[in-house]
Image: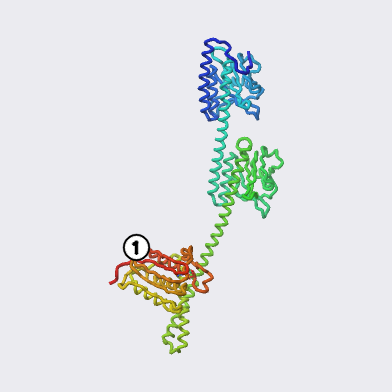
Amino acid sequence: MSQAMGGVKPPESGGADEWRERVRQLTVLLEAVRSLHGEMDPERLPGLLTEEARRLAGAQGAVLYLLDRKAGRLTAQLGENPEAPRVSMSLEEGIAGLTARTGRAHIVSDAPADSRFSPALDRATGVPTASLVSVPVTNRRGEVLAVLQARNRTGGPFSVGDAEVLSALALQAASALENAQLYGQVRVHVERLSRLLEVGKAINAEMDLDALLALIVERATRLLQADRSSLFLVDREKKELWTKVAEGLATTEIRIPLGTGIAGTVAVSGETVNIADAYADARFNPEVDRKTGYRTRTILCLPMRDKAGDILGVFQVLNKREGVFGKEDEEVLSAVASQAAIALENARLYDDLKQAYDRIKQLDQAKSDFLANISHELRTPLTPVIGYMDMMASEALGPITEHQRKGLEVMQQSVDRMRHLVEDLLSFVRMEQRQLTLQAGPFEVGTFVAEVVASQRPKAQGKGLPLTVQVPDEPLLVKGDRGELVRVLAHLIDNAIKFTNKGEVTVSAAPVTTEGGRPAVEITVRDTGMGIPPGEEERIFQRFYQVDASSTRRYGGTGLGLAIVKEIVEAHGSRIVVETAPGKGSRFSFRLTLLRPAA
Ligand code: ADP
């Protein structure tokens, strides 16, 4: 006997047993509802639901058929494990199909005698069905999502009441199922995103172009569970696609004219091609298969675009391990393609940058070599010139006239300037080659300052600038490389005179105590000149830097002086400090370790 039933009806009889049973069922139902809504895992939900249905209906077993609306099929999973056997049937089959089609509950009291009954499930489980109750699981929009069945009631046939409580459970199950499905979809989505993110990270970390191509191809193959992938790049000049990496094949370069074959067509059209059976598709050229002995079944091919939307290359993925490439594969590959495009552009930029950098390094080396050679070459002829001029001035080569002496003095000054320039260049070269080694020893500060000031005095006099010295009366012994420090102080005084037109230049030395509490001597060169504009105080210590490069002609100089000064002072473990105010003047100072007042 079978009956279809619709809305809710009162218990068929008012017996005490019947009422007791209904109360039990309601309690079970309430519990079931609570546990159903607590279960979010779409894989565990069917098991939970069938167990509750079995308890609720007092049945031997229960089963849930999930409806695949697109395929028009109902599938029951026999067991919790996702690998468990499945029973699948069309909507035309069995009481389950009937329930799904009509959206109504059905009670069958003698299944084998009912012509609509399908024994498919019995065959799979090995348990014969005698009676059953079958209810649709329908969502709020009235769409059937699944069919829930309880089988073999212990102690008598299923009643309308059983069908009603199962329907009540099914109502709750619908929203739980939908939630779980939604949750499942979100989880799959999140997993996919995190896999993509990982791929993105790996791709972006690789800067070498060839290694990057290999990595992208390998990751795409794995993500899509395919057999092999190729990434073709567009060579616009030659109007070709080329690839170096093809997993499984040798890494020889393959070139394809744009517009031919599937990859070549995608490179031109920019449209995704997804082929389920290569040999049945006219666009497929079996030539490569014939050469390599490979058998292409499925192909997914899509373009890779750069930021501007231009096609950079084409991704081609072959032979999905199971089935055919779906919409999801297209989405995943297109996400990989856009990551890959960015990484490729970066790798290319990096490549260009690296080449430019290598070129600059070569040029820089060439410049250093040139400077090293030229400064040696310039110094060699200077030595005899200076020697002979000195001899002439001291009349060792015969008497000279007053006019000749004046001329000789001008020549001596110029040669002296030239010697300084050459020495600056040599120091710079030594600095670049990290060859600056100090020969530090004790020396007395007062005589040191006096000596350097004396050498600079003619320049100050030439400009009519007073050049004053302030040193303590008692002698002070400091530690340092006297020869190098002479150049430091000489250069600071030279700059002070050069950039001061009125006022004065003062050179002083005074004992101080460092922040660390150690005794030191501070040497200062102060001027009342043009000063240094704000923001330039650091830069003047850079090689070749001049605040006003156009003033070079007016003031002379190479822009190397302060770089050398800084290097030498820092090699002494000290620091060069500048305080300045534009239009008011500058103060350059550095400190040297005070050994003790000299006796
Ligand atoms: P240069 O050979 O040009 O003097 P430096 O390295 O010694 O090279 O100095 C760099 C730049 O710092 C100078 O060109 C100048 O612009 C600025 N400068 C250095 N010393 C002074 C100073 N005492 N007053 C004003 N400007 C200065």
Q: How many marks?
A: 1
**Quarter that holds the N terminus:** top right
In front of the other: 91 or 281: 91
Residue at mark 1: C-beta within 8 A of ligand 1: no
Q: Which residue occupies the extreme right position in the image?
A: 282
Secondary structure under tag 1 reads loop
In front of the other: 208 or 104: 104
**Quadrant of residue 125 in the image?**
top right
Inspect the image, locate mark 1, and give the three-letter code of the amino acid beneath it. Thr
Categorize mark 1 by other alpha carbons within 10 Å: few (<14), some (14-19), many (20+).
Answer: some
Q: Residue 342, relative to residue 20: is it above or below?
A: below
Indicate the position of residue 226 as horizontal and vertical percent values: 60, 40
Q: Residue 131, relative to residue 200: is it above or below?
A: above
Q: Residue 134, relative to residue 598: is it above or below?
A: above
Indicate the position of residue 25 as horizontal and vertical percent values: 53, 17
- Image color mode: rainbow
Left or right of 269, for residue 473:
left
Which residue is rendered at x = 65% and y = 41% of the image? 299
Indicate the position of residue 370 as horizontal and vertical percent values: 51, 69
Q: Is residue 439 visible?
A: no
**Quarter that holds the C terminus:** bottom left
Q: Is residue 201 visible?
A: yes
Residue designated by label 1: 514
**Quadrant of residue 60 in the image?**
top right
Left or right of 469, for residue 289:
right
Q: Which residue occupies the extreme left position in the image?
A: 599
Indicate the position of residue 98 as horizontal and vertical percent values: 65, 21
**Quadrant of residue 106 in the image?**
top right
Q: Residue 190, relative to residue 130: is it above or below?
A: below
Left or right of 95, for residue 405:
left
